[in-house]
Amino acid sequence: MAKMLQQLALPAVKTKGSPLEVISRFWAWLFLLLLLLFFSLTGPGFFSLLNLQSIVNDMALALLMSLGQTFVIIAAGIDLSTGFTMGLAAVIEAVVLNALVGRLPLGLGLALPLSILIALGVGTLPGLVNGILIGRLRVPPFIATLGMYGIARGLGFIFSGGGQPVSVQIPGVGDIGNGYLLYYHPAVGFSFFHAPTLPPGARPRDLISILPFPLIVAIVAFVLCHWLLSRTRFGRHTYALGGAPEAARRAGIPVARQTLKIYMLSAFLASVAGVLYVLRFTNGDANAGDPLLLDSIAAVVIGGASLFGGEGTLVGTLIGTLIIYVIQNGLVIIGIDPYWQFVAIGAVIILAVMMDQAKARVLNR
Amino acid sequence: MREERAQLPEVEAEPAATTSAAGTQPVLVVRELVKRFGGLVAVDRVSLEVWPGEVVGLLGDNGAGKSTLIKVISGVYRPDGGQVLFEGQEVAFASPMEARRRGIETIYQDLALCENLDAPANIFLGREPTRRRWGLLKELDEHYMLQETRRVLEQLDIHIPDLRQPIRQLSGGQRQSVAIARAIYWNARLMIMDEPTAALGVAEQHKVLELVRTLRARGVPVILISHNMQDIFAVADRVVVMRRGQKVGERRIAETTSNELVGLMVGAERG
C-alpha cells in the first residue's frame, strides 16, 4: 500500500536523463503547478478549501469518463460514445428510480441500489457492442464508437420520453449526491455523512465540509483503475494490445476478449458518472455527458497517453483532468469571459501533443 | 498461476542430458511436404530432418519457398501434402500457438515483441505469473519476472544494462536477444529463426550468432533461414538449399564451399 501511495504521489520515478527529457516527462506537473500558482495569486478566493473542493467535485464526473478512456486510448482505440452512454445511464437511473418508488412503492433504501444496478447494467451495453464490433468484427474504433455515439444518444432521448431531462423528485436523493463524508463546525464538532443541525447563534458559514460524495466515488474508482492498469495482467495486456497487437496475439493474449473488456470498462465508468449525475442534480439528462466527452479525451492526451496506443498512465490522466478543471475554474474567478476556457484548453491539448512528440524524439534518439 | 510456474523449464538443466537421451532420433522430420497457393507450388515435395543440437541452415533466393516451408512447420499454413513429425509424432498444427505449445518457437524478422514494454514484460507476455494481494486480488509478480529474466539472460550471456526500460530503447541485437531468451525460457525444443541478423550491425550480428551457438551447446536445434552465406558458414552444421520450391541440395558445412552453395541456389549446379 505504501508503495502504491508512493506511485500515486510521483510520476515514474526516473529522474535521470537530459534536462529536456525530464521537462518533457514532467511538464504536465509543472504546468499544473504554475496554473495553481498563477490563479492563487490573481484570483481572489481561488486558493480556498471551498473552491479547491468545488474544482475536484466538478471534475469527478469527467474524471470517471477519462479513466475508462485511458484504457481505451492505451489500447490504441478511442471511445466517442462515452458522453451519451453517460447520458443514457442517467436517464435509465432517473426513469427506473421514479418507477420503483412511484409505481411499485419501494423504499429508497431498496429502490436506489436496484435502480443503480439496472442503470449500470444498461449503460455497460454500449461498451459490450463496441467491444464486439472492434474486437471481433474489426470495425475501426472511431467508426464503431461514433455509431454508438448516435445510438446511445437516440436511446437516451427515447427513454426520457422526448428529450426533456427526467426529473427525480424523491426526497433524499439529492442529499446523497450533494453530501459530504465529513462536516466540522466549531460549535458542534465533527459529524459524518449528514450536515449537523446547528445550535442557534452558530454561524452557518463556519461549517467546513470535507470530501464530497462524487469525489469519494471518483477517488475509489481512480485507485482501483490505477491498480488494474499498473499491477494486473489486464493492465499489462492493455499496454501490449496498444503497443503491438500482432505481438500480443502471438503471445497468446486473447485480443478480442481483452478489447471487449476494455470497452465495457469504459462504458461502465461512464455509466457510474451518469448515476452520480442523477444523485447530484436530481434529474436524468440524456445530454448530461456530451460536454464532458472532449474534456475527458483531452485529459488523457494532456496526461501523456499516445493516441497511437501503448503509452499512458492514470496519474497522467488525473493531472490532465486537473489542468482542464483548474483552467475552467480559474478563468471564471479572475473574471475572464468563460468562452476563453475553450480556447485555453484547445491550446493546452496542442501543447500536450507537441510535448509528446518532443519526448518521442528525445527517447528514440 | 503457481501450477503453471511449477512447469517452468529448468533452464540450468544439463543440456548434455537432453542431447544424449534424444540424440537417437531426429527432433523434426519433414517428409515430401507440399504447399500450393492456387496454381503455384510454393513447396514441392521437400523432405528434411533436424537432429538435437544441430544448426540447420536453410538457404535459397527470394521466392525459393524457405519462408513458406517454415510457416508450414510452425503452424501458420496447413500443408497440402506430406508429413511433419515432431519428436517422433505426426503433427498438424492448427495455429502458431499450437506449435509453440509443443515447443516450436519461431523468431520472425519483425520480432513479435511489444516495444513499449520492458524485457521482463515481453518474456512473460501472455503468461505473466501473479501473486495474491490481501488473499484476493491477483497482481503481477514483477519481482519474480525480473529475477527470472536476469537468470535467463545471464545464462545466455546477454547483457542489458537497464531491464526496466521499454525495449524500444534497446539496440536491435538486444531486442533479438530478448526474443531468443523468451523462447529459451519457455522451453523451446526447436528454434526457427528467420533472417535473425538481417537488420543488425556487425558486432550485433556476431552476438546473435554466438547466441545460436549457445543454443546448440544446450541441445536446442535451430533452423536458421538466411541468405547471408557468412552466417551459414559461421554457425550451421548442415545446410539445405531450396530453389523454386524444391530442395535442390543438402550439404554438411564442412564439406562444401560458398561457391557450390550459390551454384545450387541459382540452379547452375545440380544437387
Image: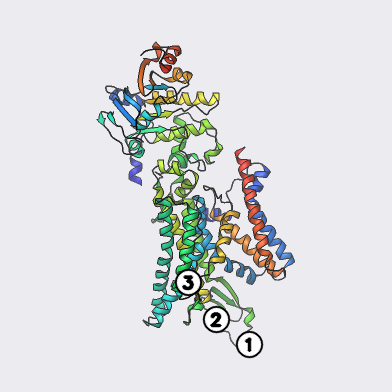
Q: Nearer the viewer, mark 3 or mark 2?
A: 3
Q: How crowded is mark 3: few (under 14 residues within 10 Å), some or many (20 or more)?
A: many
- Mark 3, secondary structure of its residue: helix
Q: Does residue A71 show up?
A: no
Q: Where is residue A356 in the image (x, y as percent from the top left)?
A: 61, 48
Q: Nearer the viewer, residue A171 or A260?
A: A260
Distance Cα–Cα, label 3 vs label 2 = 39 Å
Q: Which of A318 and A83 is in front in this view?
A: A83
Q: Which of marks 3 and 1 is in front?
A: 3
Please report contact status of discs 3 and 1: CB closer than 8 Å, yes or no. Answer: no
Q: How crowded is mark 2: few (under 14 residues within 10 Å), some or many (20 or more)?
A: some
Distance Cα–Cα, label 3 vs label 1 = 48 Å
Residue topped by disc 2: A196
Q: Position of residue B170 (x, y in %)?
A: 54, 35
Q: Does residue B262 show up?
A: yes
Tell me what residue is drawn at x 41 percent, y 75 percent: A96
Of all residues shown, which one is farthest toward the front?
A: B39
- Give amino acid for label 3: Phe
Quadrant of the snapshot with the C terminus of chain A: top right
The tag on residue A201 is 1
Q: Where is residue A50 in the image (x, y as percent from the top left)?
A: 63, 72
Tell which circle, 3 or 1, labels the residue nearer the N-terminal end.
3
The image quarter in which residue A183 lies? bottom right
Residue topped by disc 3: A157
Please report contact status of discs 3 and 2: CB closer than 8 Å, yes or no. Answer: no
Q: In this view, does A332 lie to the left or right of A294?
A: right
Tell me what residue is drawn at x 65 percent, y 67 percent: A329
Tell which circle, 3 or 2, labels the residue nearer the N-terminal end.
3
Tell which circle, 1 or 2, labels the residue nearer the N-terminal end.
2
Of all residues shown, which one is farthest toward the left?
A: B89
